[in-house]
Image (spheres, rainbow, N blue to C red):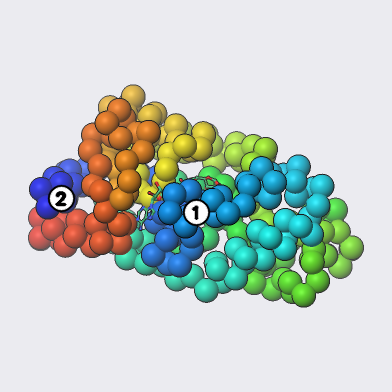
Amino acid sequence: MDDLIQRAAKDLAAAKNVVALTGAGISVESGIPPFRGKGGVWEKIDPMEYAHIDAFLRDPAKVWNVLIKEMKGVVDRAEPNDAHRGLARLEEMGILKTIITQNVDGLHQAAGNTDVIEFHGNFAWQKCLDCGNRCETSQINTEQIPPRCHCGGIFRPEVIFFGELIPPQHLSRSQLVASQCDIMLVMGTSAVVQPAALMPVISKQSGAKVIEINPERTPLTGTISDYIIQGKGGEVTNQIIAKLEKLIQ
Ligand code: APR
């Protein structure tokens, strides 16, 4: 692994425009469970029954009780971990420009990254289905399920449910930055959900190097990725940053 860490540090030191694509795995060390694989949320509940917009509209109380309330508890307590802090350090070094994240936990911004495309929205805000009034998730009283706006309408999180479109402005900007980067750093994603998983393909086709950081291989491994560093996001990022600090001294 050490030679791959050294190789990644050298690649990043020589890079001018790095973009990262992150997924739920980068927040696992912050106590937020992933969706797939060991301890994955979708191993316990069916995403089509609880994370599809049609399911939410059909029975908002059920989705609030089983999925959203749980998520609120976990996200409220979560803090950035070494992987988030490492990406913030890469931005400070002028190496990392943009993060395309599939996560809705806001931890990249909390760690200090300033250009984060929230591909699947953000859990920090709720919106009334009727009048469009917004309310911070932290202010929602989950004693009353589903939570209601003062107009009587039901609140929904400003995340993208299955069955909903990725906000066009996020999709187009992600495609643009993916096509312009010289390295795409893919961290903590199973790379099975489209169109997010297409971004590293766009980068590769545009001549960028694609580096994966993940304990497990993914569909990108061996096809799109130049190499994978198989390890946990926080540990791997710490080791890369330590070598990088020496290289750019
Ligand atoms: N560090 C890095 N990666 C990790 C760690 C860790 N500590 N722990 C697990 N992983 C990896 C897993 O090996 C897996 O490849 O993180 C990945 C998590 O995959 P998913 O749970 O599928 O998360 P993600 O790829 O973000 O899912 C994409 O699916 O359900 C939708 O909208 C949801 O945004 C989500 C999308």
Q: Vertically, is 55 above or below 192?
A: below
Give x and y (percent) for residue 84.
Answer: 37, 61
Q: Residue at x 85, y 53 (%)?
A: 130
Q: Residue at x 49, y 54 (%)?
A: 40
Return the residue found at the far right: 152
Of the residues shown, which amino acid type is indicated by label 2? Met
Label 1 to label 2: alpha-carbon separation: 26 Å
Q: Are marks 1 and 2 in contact (CB under 8 Å)?
A: no
Q: Residue at x 31, y 57 (%)?
A: 233
Q: Residues within 10 Å of mark 1 (few under 14, many from 20)?
A: some
Nearer to us of marks 1 and 2 is 1
Q: Is residue 110 visible?
A: no
- Residue closest to the eye, 47 or 150: 47
- Residue closest to the eye, 172 or 201: 201
| Placement of the C terminus among the 4 image quadrants | bottom left
Residue 40 disc label: 1
Say which residue label 2 marks.
1
Q: Residue at x 43, y 60 (%)?
A: 27
Q: Is residue 63 visible?
A: yes
For mark 2, give the secondary structure: loop
Give x and y (percent) for residue 114.
Answer: 43, 57
**Mark 1 near ligand 1 (CB under 8 Å)?**
yes
Q: Quadrant of residue 26?
A: bottom left
